[in-house]
Image (cartoon, grey):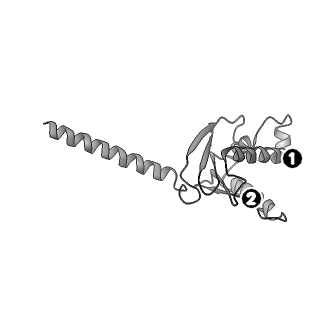
């Protein structure tokens, strides 16, 4: 009876490990491909709601616009930004060079720069004349559910946007 109980316990543990691993693999299929496995994660409570007409096309258009702006500069881009997911609801920002995204602190500084840039756009000025929203709020407005940032080598950090 004790051996049978031990076998059931071992089987239960094995099934739990396999189920957890499978759930994690389907949850983030981009880890290990676009960036290292996510090391840290946080939740950001947005101060704005998603626009009713925000859809996959709007999110892809946003990323395309940001990328086009980067390629118009006289120097190579420091980061690559792209949308993934069935509805393009996942934003990924990866460092292309050593330096700009080497630490989480630098990644947060990039988010602050993106906030400042977003605040210069007419749309953002219209909805936020007091300048209280951040780049993460803009992502929520567009319908993004998360942003994953990485140096492209050693770490990744995900911010889930609610």
Magenta stretch containing residue 151, yes or no? yes
Range drawn in magenta: 149-153
Point out residue 19 in the picture as x, y percentages from the top left corner: 38, 47
Q: Which mark is residue 139?
A: none
Tell which tag, 2 or 1, sits nearer the viewer: 2
Residue nearer the viewer, 39 or 49: 39
Q: Residue at x 71, y 44 (%)?
A: 108
Q: If the image is split into quadrants, where does the C terminus sit?
A: top right
At label 2, counting other C-alpha atoms closer than 10 Å, the crowd grade (few under 14, some 14-19, many 20 or more) is some
Q: Quadrant of residue 82?
A: bottom right
**Distance between mark 2 and mark 1 Cα atoms:** 25 Å
Residue nearer the viewer, 161 or 39: 39
User: Is residue 145 shown left or right of residue 106?
Assistant: left
Q: Is residue 61 above or below residue 134?
A: below
N-terminal-most mark, 2 or 1 = 2
Residue nearer the viewer, 105 or 67: 105
Point out residue 66 in the picture as x, y percentages from the top left corner: 77, 57
Q: In terms of secondary structure, where does tag 1 sit?
A: helix
Q: If the image is split into quadrants, where does the N terminus sit?
A: top left
Q: Residue at x 72, y 47 (%)?
A: 106
User: Is residue 134 shown left or right of residue 33?
Assistant: right
At label 1, counting other C-alpha atoms closer than 10 Å, the crowd grade (few under 14, some 14-19, many 20 or more) is few
Q: Which residue is mark 2?
A: 78
Magenta stretch containing residue 47, yes or no? no
The residue lying furthest to the left in this view is 1
User: Is residue 17 shown left or right of residue 79?
Assistant: left
Q: Which residue is mark 1?
A: 122
Point out residue 111 in the picture as x, y percentages from the top left corner: 74, 45
Q: Main secondary structure of the magenta part?
A: loop
Q: In terms of secondary structure, where does tag 2 sit?
A: loop
């Amino acid at each position: 009876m004790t051996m049978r109980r031990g076998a059931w316990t071992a089987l239960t543990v094995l099934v739990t490990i396999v189920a957890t691993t499978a759930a994690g693999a389907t949850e983030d299929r981009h880890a290990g491909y676009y960036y290292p496995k996510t090391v840290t994660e946080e939740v950001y409570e947005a101060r704005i709601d998603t626009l009713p007409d925000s859809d996959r096309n709007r999110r892809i258009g946003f990323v395309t616009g940001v990328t086009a702006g980067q390629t118009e500069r006289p120097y190579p881009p420091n980061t690559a930004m792209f949308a993934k997911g069935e509805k393009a609801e996942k934003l990924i920002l990866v460092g292309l060079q050593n330096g700009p995204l080497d630490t989480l602190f630098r990644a947060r500084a990039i988010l602050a720069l993106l906030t400042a840039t977003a605040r210069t756009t007419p749309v953002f000025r219209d909805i936020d004349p007091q300048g209280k929203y951040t780049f993460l709020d803009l992502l929520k407005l567009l319908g993004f559910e998360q942003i994953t940032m990485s140096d492209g080598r050693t770490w990744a950090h995900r911010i889930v946007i609610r």
